[in-house]
Amino acid sequence: MKDIAVSDVRNFVLMGHTASGKTTLADALLYKMGVNDRLGSVDQGSSLGDYTDEEKARKTTIYAKSFCGLYKSSDGHNMDIVFCDTPGYADFFGQVIQASRIAGAALITVDAHAGIQVGTAKAWKQADALELPRTIVVTGLDRENSPFEKVMADIRAMWGARCIPVVIPLPDGSGVMDVLGCSNPPGSVSGLIKDAKNALVEMAAETDDTLIEKYLGGQSLTPVEISDGLRHAVFERKLVPVFACAAIKNVGVAELLDGIARFFPSPTDRPMKDAEGKPIDPSPKAPFVGFVWRTVNDPFIGHMSFVYVCGGTLKSDMEVLNVNKDQKERIVQFVALNGKKQLPIAEAEAGDIVAISKLKNTVLGDALCQSGARATFEPFHFPNPVMWYAVLAKTQGDEDKIGTALHRLAEDDPTIRLDRNVDTHETILSGMGDTHLAVAVERMRKRNGVDVTLSTPKIPYRETITGRGDGHYKHKKQSGGRGQYGEVYLKVEPLPEGDSEWFKDAIVGGVIPHNFVPAVHKGVLEGMTRGALAGFPVVNIKSIVYDGSYHDVDSSEIAFKIAGGRAFRDAMTKAKPVLLEPIMSVKITIPEQFMGDVNGDMSHRRGRIVGMEVVENMQVITADIPQAELFTYCAELRSMTGGRGTFEMSFARYDIVPGSVAQKVMAATEKVKEEE
Ligand SMILES: Nc1nc2c(ncn2[C@@H]2O[C@H](COP(=O)(O)OP(=O)(O)OP(=O)(O)O)[C@@H](O)[C@H]2O)c(=O)[nH]1
Ligand SMILES: [Mg+2]
C-alpha cells in the first residue's frame, strides 16, 4: 500500500473558457508541489501541460492531461493531489467530457478581466451534468483592470449566493488573505473579509442541526466544526468556494492548494459509480477496478491507455479482465504522468491516474477489473460533429494509410469521425471545428507521414416525384442475327406512406411474359439509382408496370431490362420530379445581443426557425437548415458572435430543394458531367 490514505487523495478537473489560465495554474500548482523545479510557461513553450508540437504552436491546450503531486497541507497532512487540465477551446470539448468523468470535483477558472465567458458557462453545465462539487478560481489578478469585487458580483448574479469567496486579494495584487484563517486583515479589505467569513460560518452551521442551534444560540463554532461543515456543503453543492490567484506571479497558489485539501472530496467521500450507479469500493484492499478515460494511438509513443483507478490496488504484472470485451489483459507496467513527464510507480490506488502501454484489446470507455470485481461504466456521450470535409489523399496510393491513421485518431477522439458517403462516394472527415480538423490533419502529416486535402463535401441530393407520370419504351434492335425486343408501359406515383411495395407487376394476359418481369424490375431499380433530373438516387416512388409486348424469338432479359429502365426514366420526367436535400435540425445558443445578426443570417441560409427559448441567460434558437448551407456555419457563427455562439445539429429529414437553387445544382452537375 502507498503511504497516503485514499481519504487524503484529492482528484479534480480544471475547466473553463479558453485562455482563462488553466494550464498556467496547473504549472503553478506543480511548481508549488515541487513536481517541477521551475515555473513552466505556456507562452515560452516550457509548460508541463501544453507540451505537444500542436499545442506549443497554438499556445493552447488541445489534449486533456493528468498531473499528480504531493502536498503537505497547512495542518501538516500529506496529501496526494491528482488533477487533469483540459482545453477551453470549443473544438476540443470532447476532451473535457472525458476528463470530467473521472474527477471528484471541478475547479472552474474565470479570468478576472474577461469575466464569465461561454466556455465558463459550458464548464459549469458539464459540472452540473456530472453533479460535481466545485470551486471557482478567479485568475489573472495581476492584470490591470481586474477588480475582484466586480467578478465576484457577476459570479453571484450568475450562480447565486452559494458562491462565497474564501480568499480576498490584497488591492495591490501582491497576495491573498485567507478569509477564515486571517485574524488581522488590513483595513482596506477587512469589510470584505468580515462579510465572507460570516457567510461561510452561517453556511457551515446550516449543514447540521446541532450546529445551527449552537450558531443561533450565539455560540461560536470551532474551526473543525466550520471546516467539516463547509466541506460537507461543498460535497452537497450548496457551497461554491471562490479563490483568486495570479498564477504567473505565484500569488494565491498555496492558498488554493490548501483549499483543495480542505474542501474537495476524496475518492472515499465520492467513489466512482459503475454503469448501474453503484459506487465502486475505493479501498486499497478491494479488487482493482480501472476506467479507461483516454487512449492515445500514436506511432511515436505507441498505444497508451490512460486509466483512472476507481478502487483496489494496481500492481505491475497484474492480470485484469477487460469487462467490456470479456478479454484478459496483462498490465506489465504503468507510469504516473505529469504531462510529458513519466514517473514509474509501483502501485496505484483510488484517485490515481496511470498510463498503461500495449493493452491490445482495450479502447476508450472500457473497464478493467481484477478478479472479484466486475464493473462497466456508462458510455461517454459525445456531441455530433459540426464541421465536415471530404478528404482526399494528396499522393495517390496513400488512401489505405490515411484510412488507418484517421480511424486511429477517431478511436482516441470520438468527436472526430470518418465516414464513407455511399451516395457521393466521398470519404468524409468531420469534427468540432476548423482547428480540430486542422490539428487532425497536421498530426497525420507529422506522425503518419501522409498528407491530405480537405474540400467541401458533395451534398447527397436525392430525387423524387410530386405527381404521376406515364412512361413507355420499346427496345428494338435488328442487327444481323438475333435481334432484341422488349416493350414496357409503366406508371409512377409517389410511394404512399407505409407502403413498401415500390414495384408492382400489374401485367394481365401475359403481354410481358412472367419470366421477363424480374428483368423489368431490375431495369427500374437501375433507373432509380440515377434519377432523371440530375442523376441522384430516386426515393419514395412507386412503379406500376401495366402493359408491354414481346417477341417470341428476339425478346430477352437484357432487352426488357433496358426497356424497364428507359420507361421509368420517361415516366419520372413527366411526374413533376424534384430534387431533395438533407435538412438538419440545428440548435444554436447565443447571447441575446446577437439575435438580430444570427436570425438575419438564417434567412440567407434558407433556414426556418422552429423555436426560441431562453436557457441560463442564453438565447436558444432551434431551426431547420439545409445541410448545404451549414458546411461553414461553425466558423461563421463564431465570427458573428465573437466566439460566444455555439450550435449542435442532427439530421432531420429530406426536403424539396426550391426551384432556383435546384437549377443551380443541376447546372453544376451538368458541368461536372461534361468535364468528365
Ligand atoms: N498576467 C497574467 N497572465 C496570465 C495568468 N494566467 C495565465 N495568463 C496568461 O494567459 C494566457 C492563457 O493562459 P493559459 O494558461 O494558456 O490558459 P488556458 O485556460 O489553459 O487556455 P486553453 O488551454 O486555451 O483553454 C497565457 O498567455 C498566460 O500567460 C495570470 O495569472 N496573470
Ligand atoms: Mg490550457
Image: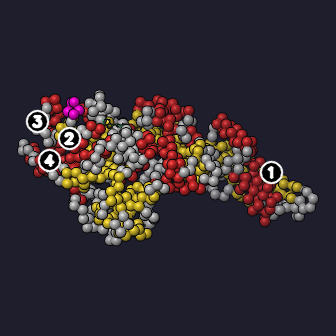
Kindly state the secondary structure of the residue where label 4 is placed.
Answer: helix
As measured in the structure, the alpha-carbon distance from the residue carrying label 3 to the one carrying label 2 is 16 Å
Q: What amino acid is found at the position of numbered circle 4 in the picture?
A: Ile
Position of 18 with respect to 393 (left or right) is: left
> Crowding near pointer 3: few (<14 within 10 Å), some, many (20+)?
few
**For residue 184, which numbered disc appears in the image?**
3
Outermost residue on the right side: it is: 480
**Residue 77 picture location, percent across and down:** 17, 53
Of labels 4 and 1, earlier in sequence is 4
> Crowding near pointer 2: few (<14 within 10 Å), some, many (20+)?
many
- Please tell me which residue is depicted at 10% across the width and 46% down the height of the picture: 221
- Please tell me which residue is depicted at 67% across the width and 50% down the height of the picture: 537
As measured in the structure, the alpha-carbon distance from the residue carrying label 4 to the one carrying label 3 is 19 Å
* Tag 4 and tag 1, C-beta contact below 8 Å: no
As measured in the structure, the alpha-carbon distance from the residue carrying label 2 to the one carrying label 4 is 13 Å
**For residue 226, which numbered disc appears in the image?**
4
Kindly state the secondary structure of the residue where label 1 is placed.
Answer: strand
Of labels 4 and 3, earlier in sequence is 3
**For residue 660, which numbered disc appears in the image?**
none
Of labels 2 and 4, earlier in sequence is 2
